[in-house]
Image (tube, rainbow, N blue to C red):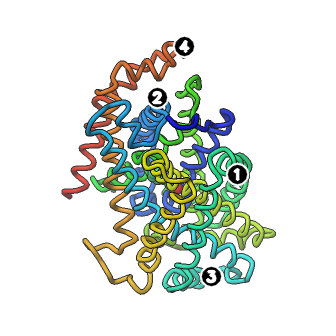
């Protein structure tokens, strides 16, 4: 083996970095509009169910594989399960590129909105004007590409810096800041005239709107939000020292991520109703179209806007870093490339893939494959297919191949009291494979 593996500097450092991976555009950009499109309260409940049943067990499973193997996803699956299983790791590496292709585009919009918040573009709180700002930006050619490229370069910069230096230090300071600004925005959004109807839509479930598609959307969103199913959590687990208490750390990460998503829902959905928008109408632009009206209704709104989009960009950065880190970690470990080279080549590949995604709202808006733009297709392929599939295979690997060995590793050879561990194993063996399998199949054939 090569040099000793780098490890997280502290327990808080790990939790902040893993929560930094989990909390990102998935929570603040995607969760609110997915909830809007899928019926509100009923989606929220199904989403929370997916997190509690599949999410928590699988975060634990991924962290466990990573920590046991102390290796990248491909080598880790080989180490704990043997032949054939490295394919699961490989699928994760490909998925990371698929996600990054559209992730950097949305993160790029966030950077553009930082500028908009200071140059006066958002100062007209009229809904039509705000929609036009978004549509104009995203339908452009060079602007979305340039912002996506800038964001890709930032991600590569942090990844080159290495684990402790770059990722951990930034996350520790900025995550709590994001939390505070979110609270302020929730309070303002909830007190806007007309917000109550949004609160009702978000919290009171109407199960008559639930279809098979609601389940597919909820599970995809749960996996996406928890950074699950492609080896990102596994990679972060591989930087964990062996004596750490995995269950408490996993619970902390899952709770933080879910809390932030719910807060984002409480911020965006009432604001959406206050702005007179019907749920589902705003699509991928919802958060960007709705929030400026909230800022406008606050004293010093410009500063809130700037702070919010800055912190959203940073939250997106800590997530994109975890995606790129997974890829880089694989190339460095398995193919003996330098970190610098692996990062540079991967970033160029991400840039190339981000081009059609960046143009999906303009030049290539009518270029459709399976009825979807490139942007929507990449989102669909990852959230609705490869992430749940990766999660299903991870559950089988830990539940059946590792089996009792997994409980032994989870409890640090019995030093941690974990009387619920058999329940966890039961979920991984039966509940997760059957549940996720059913949702995947009915998503594909409905
Ligand atoms: N979870 C992040 C978000 O919510 C995105 C993300 C980072 C991700 N790493 C991942 C999604 C790995 C899936 C897999 O924005």
Gap between marks 4 and 1 measured at Cα? 33 Å
Spot the residue most to the left: 445
Q: Quadrant of the C terminus?
A: bottom left
Asked if 118 appears above or below 10 in the picture, the reply is below
Q: Judge from the rendering whether residue 217 lies leftward or rightward of residue 101; answer left or right.
A: left
Pointer 4: what residue? 415
Q: Nearer the viewer, mark 3 or mark 2?
A: 2
Q: Residue 236: which disc?
A: none
Q: Residues within 10 Å of mark 1 (few under 14, many from 20)?
A: some
Q: Is mark 2 within 8 Å of ligand 1?
A: no
Residue appearing at x 76%, y 70% in the figure: 301
- Mark 3 or mark 4, earlier in chain: 3
Gap between marks 3 and 1 measured at Cα? 36 Å
Q: Nearer the viewer, mark 4 or mark 2?
A: 2
Pointer 2: what residue? 68
- Mark 3 or mark 1, earlier in chain: 3
Residue appearing at x 66%, y 66% in the figure: 309
Q: Residue 126: which disc?
A: 3
Gap between marks 1 and 2 measured at Cα? 27 Å
Q: Residue 170: which disc?
A: 1
Position of residue 93 measured from the top left corner of the image (x, y, whole percent): 40, 52
- Mark 4 or mark 1, earlier in chain: 1
Q: Residues within 10 Å of mark 4 (few under 14, many from 20)?
A: few
At numbered mark 1, what does the secondary structure look like: helix, strand or loop? helix
Position of residue 240 measured from the top left corner of the image (x, y, whole percent): 57, 33
| Residue 211 falls in image quadrant | bottom left
- Mark 1 or mark 2, earlier in chain: 2
Q: Nearer the viewer, residue 24 or 336?
A: 336
């Amino acid at each position: 083996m090569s040099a000793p593996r780098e490890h997280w500097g502290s327990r808080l450092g790990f939790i902040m970095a893993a929560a930094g991976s989990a909390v990102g555009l998935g929570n603040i950009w995607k969760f609110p509009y997915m909830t809007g499109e899928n019926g509100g309260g009923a989606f929220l409940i199904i989403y929370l169910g997916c997190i509690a049943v599949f999410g928590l067990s699988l975060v634990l499973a991924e962290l466990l594989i990573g920590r046991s193997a102390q290796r990248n996803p491909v080598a880790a699956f080989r180490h704990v399960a043997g032949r054939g299983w490295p394919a699961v790791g490989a699928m994760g590496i490909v998925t990371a590129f698929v996600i990054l292709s559209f992730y950097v585009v949305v993160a790029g919009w966030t950077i553009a909105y930082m500028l908009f918040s200071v140059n006066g573009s958002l100062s007209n709180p009229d809904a039509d004007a705000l929609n036009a700002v978004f549509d104009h930006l995203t339908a452009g050619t060079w602007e979305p590409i340039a912002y996506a490229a800038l964001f890709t370069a930032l991600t590569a910069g942090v990844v080159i810096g290495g684990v402790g230096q770059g990722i951990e230090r930034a996350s520790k300071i900025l995550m709590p800041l994001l939390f505070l600004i979110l609270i302020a925005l929730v309070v303002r959004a909830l007190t806007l005239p007309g917000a109550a109807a949004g609160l009702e839509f978000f919290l009171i479930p109407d199960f008559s709107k639930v279809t098979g598609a609601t389940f597919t959307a909820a599970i995809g969103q749960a996996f996406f939000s928890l950074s699950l199913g492609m080896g990102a959590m596994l990679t972060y687990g591989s930087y964990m020292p062996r004596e750490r208490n995995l269950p408490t750390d996993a619970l902390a990460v899952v709770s933080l991520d879910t809390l932030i998503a719910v807060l984002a829902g409480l911020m965006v959905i009432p604001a959406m109703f206050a702005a007179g928008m019907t749920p589902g109408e705003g699509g991928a632009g919802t958060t960007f179209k709705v929030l400026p009206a909230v800022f406008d209704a606050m004293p010093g709104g410009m500063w809130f806007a700037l702070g919010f989009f800055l912190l959203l960009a940073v939250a997106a950065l800590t997530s994109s870093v975890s995606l790129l880190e997974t890829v880089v970690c694989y190339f460095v470990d398995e193919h003996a490339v330098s970190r610098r080279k692996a990062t540079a080549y991967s970033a160029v590949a991400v840039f190339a893939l981000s081009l059609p995604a960046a143009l999906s709202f303009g030049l290539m808006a009518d270029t459709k494959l399976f009825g979807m733009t490139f942007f929507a297709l990449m989102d669909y392929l990852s959230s609705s297919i490869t992430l749940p599939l990766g999660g299903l295979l991870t559950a089988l690997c830990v539940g059946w191949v590792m089996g009792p060995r997994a409980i032994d590793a989870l409890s640090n050879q019995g030093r941690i009291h974990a009387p619920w561990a058999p329940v966890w194993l039961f979920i991984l063996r039966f509940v997760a494979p059957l549940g996720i399998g059913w949702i995947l199949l009915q998503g594909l054939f409905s």
